[in-house]
Amino acid sequence: MVYLDYSATTQAEKEVLDSFIKASNYFGNPNSLHNLGTKSKNLIEASTKQIKQILNLKDDEIIYTSGASEANNLAIKGITKYKNRGNHIITTHLEHSSVYGPLDYMQEQGYTIDYVPLKNGQVDLEALKNLITDKTVLVTINAINSETGIRQPIEKIGEILKKYPKVIFHSDVTQAIGKINIDLTNVDLASFSAHKFFGIKGIGALIKKKNIELEPLIHGGKSTTIYRSGTPATSLIVSMAKALRLAYEDLEVEKIKNLNEKIKSHLEKYPNVYINSPKDAIPHILNISVIGVKPETILHALEEDEIYISTQSACATSNISKAIKTLTNDDQRAKSSLRISISKKTTEDEINLFLQSFNKNYQRLVVKK
């Protein structure tokens, strides 16, 4: 099997599963006052401290969630706490569906949404400044686009927004955490999920600056924070801290970059293949379009050789890629995009097998069509 869909999800590391099982011995409710509860609470606090150290977080609070989708919803819907401050939100056309969903909801609640223009896929910083008004309450811009690997300058965006103290800056950093080093100093809210960096599904987090308040999505009962009620998932939290530590022990970005270049240099030789990911995208994600054949046809043809890639994001709700349409302004490329996503576990032999299968199927599906 050749798995090239790491941006959709990853397989949990054995060490991560071991941490989960060991932590399961601390089954007391962390909110209970007895000794079993205290031991569980201490374990969560130790894991939280470790996560903060790895991500270089100082005064930030970590709100544990079921994943990045819940974290994105909490970040965006939670700003209704500041409804007297304004009703204007700024975003881009390169966000995940778990950002667009709550933005649609906010629009129904009377909020105005503006989309900042892009330059070569990156936010036009001057245009961003010009969009900010005295009604702007939130800017939500992801760190890395999940389909193309485009990296946004969130550090620079954060610097700009520091001059507007009433504007909250949220970033979905799901595709960045565990892949690259990232500076969250000037980000007020940041969402991520463990299953993107070889953790277990069902646990994620929203990093929140202490001076930010949010309206909770889930009310009722004491937890690790007032912003998310429910019994804390001790084992999942511990396992996420372990997965994060393992991820940052060695990111192996140079290896991944070399594999990306190998794929790219091979595929760009085909006349019907277009490379959609820009040169400065992170190397973990390579988006292409194969004109003349449906993307799902290629996907299933590769699947016959036990090679797994994806079309768009795994959570996409349309048959046309909004991200590729925004980047290329080409409907054909937007309707025929494929995502190849690799990780430090990907080997050169796996890439060779993928390229051989791609060539075979290209000749069969495109050339001989």
Image (tube, grey):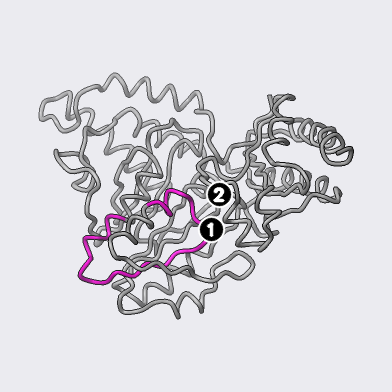
The residue pinned by badge 2 equals 146
Q: Position of residue 316 (x, y in %)?
A: 52, 45
Question: Is residue 85 shown in magenta?
Answer: yes
Residue at image coords 51%, 74%: 125
Dot 1 or dot 2: first in sequence order is: 1
180 or 308, which lies in front? 308
112 or 171, which lies in front? 112
For disc 1, the neighbor class at 10 Å (few under 14, some 14 to 19, many from 20) is: many
Element on which disc 2 rests: loop
Identify the disc placed on residue 301.
none
Residue 256 falls in image quadrant: top right
Residue at image coords 54%, 38%: 8
The residue pinned by badge 1 equals 94
Q: Amino acid at mark 1?
A: Leu
Left or right, residue 26 beside residue 243: left
39 or 310, which lies in front? 310
Q: Position of residue 133 (x, y in %)?
A: 35, 79
Report how far apart the C-alphas of labels 1 and 2 lie in the structure. Answer: 8 Å
Q: Position of residue 268 (x, y in %)?
A: 82, 51
For disc 2, the neighbor class at 10 Å (few under 14, some 14 to 19, many from 20) is: many
Q: Give the answer, above or below, for where 124 lies relative to 78.
A: below
Left or right, residue 313 beside residue 305: left
Residue at image coords 52%, 61%: 93
Pick the quarter of the image with the C terminus.
top right
Residue at image coords 54%, 68%: 123
- Magenta-highlighted residues: 77-101
Left or right, residue 33 beside residue 314: left
How many callouts does the rendering have? Answer: 2
Q: Give the answer, above or below, for where 314 lies relative to 72.
A: above
